[in-house]
Amino acid sequence: MRTKIVAGNWKMNKTWSETLQFFNDLKRNSHELPKNVEVIVAPPSLYLSQLTNESQPVILAAQNAHQENKGAFTGEISCSMLKSLNIDYCIIGHSERRMYFNESNELVEKKVKAALANEVSPILCCGETLEEREANTHFDIIESQLSFIKNLSVKEVRNIVIAYEPVWAIGTGKTASSEQAQEIHQFIRNLLSKWHGEELANQIRILYGGSCKPDNALELFNCPDIDGGLIGGASLVPEDFIAIIKSAATAQ
Ligand code: PGA
């Protein structure tokens, strides 16, 4: 039985006072938060150190980190720095990083390895563009984004969370249908099984992301290979975020 995850990716949103407001709202409603879901929020990294005592029962994540532990990389933060604040998760390879910051599969692999080496669990994002889906290359694209996993150790793989986020569904209001999402999630789990065996593949959480909202979350989370969601826009609004968390709690 895989514990479901609902992870909020705030991207570059919220001032510090809005951030505190969000966590206060969440705390006020914490009696509504189900115990059987892992709830994660990735705020702008600037806020992480201040939030380590504020965020309970929410687990904090970073949205990105550099592949080196330290050095002359102005403006960057490292996984060893995240670990030093007891940050347990880091989103890696989000499509916006791939698109706007030219992150290649090779760089994403390095970042995942840096996270794992520092005992930070990567939330590794993959997903195809609309053109790639229309050209029917989506399975190949996803396999190429994930293929480095086959060379990782069992211990490393166990600490990875995968997020399937079709680029055409991110921030567009166009969600993948539950059939489309399940088809890819099953494909990813089959790849994991081929590379590392069925037992390990069945332990890995695979999240769906892309216009996941209170009104479609339950249907998505009820799919057998969907283990929760990576939520952008709807994670900025406490009521919507809580509603999605509740959907994860009630999903089969
Ligand atoms: P969205 O973003 O929920 O706003 O579509 C998801 C994501 O980019 O992680």
Image (cartoon, rainbow, N blue to C red):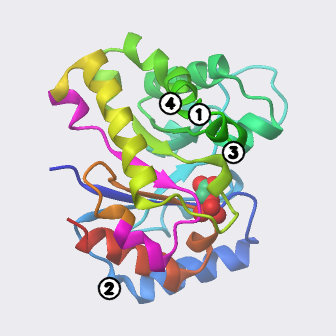
Distance from label 1 to label 3 (Cα)?
A: 10 Å
Q: What's the amino acid at mark 4?
A: Phe
Q: Residue at x 39, y 55 (%)?
A: 179
Secondary structure beneath disc 1? Answer: loop
Q: Which residues are magenta?
A: 199-219
Residue 221, magenta (yes or no): no
Of callouts 2 and 4, which one flags the residue occurring earlier in the amino acid sequence?
2
Q: Is residue 122 visible?
A: yes
Q: What's the amino acid at mark 1?
A: Asn
Q: What's the amino acid at mark 3?
A: Leu
User: Pointer 4: what residue?
Assistant: 139
Depth check, mark 2 against mark 4: the one in front is 4
Distance from label 3 to label 4 (Cα)?
A: 13 Å
Q: What's the amino acid at mark 2?
A: Glu
Where's residue 25, x and y in %?
Answer: 52, 86
In terms of image quarters, where does ligand 1 lie? bottom right
Secondary structure beneath disc 2? Answer: helix
User: Pointer 2: what residue?
Assistant: 32
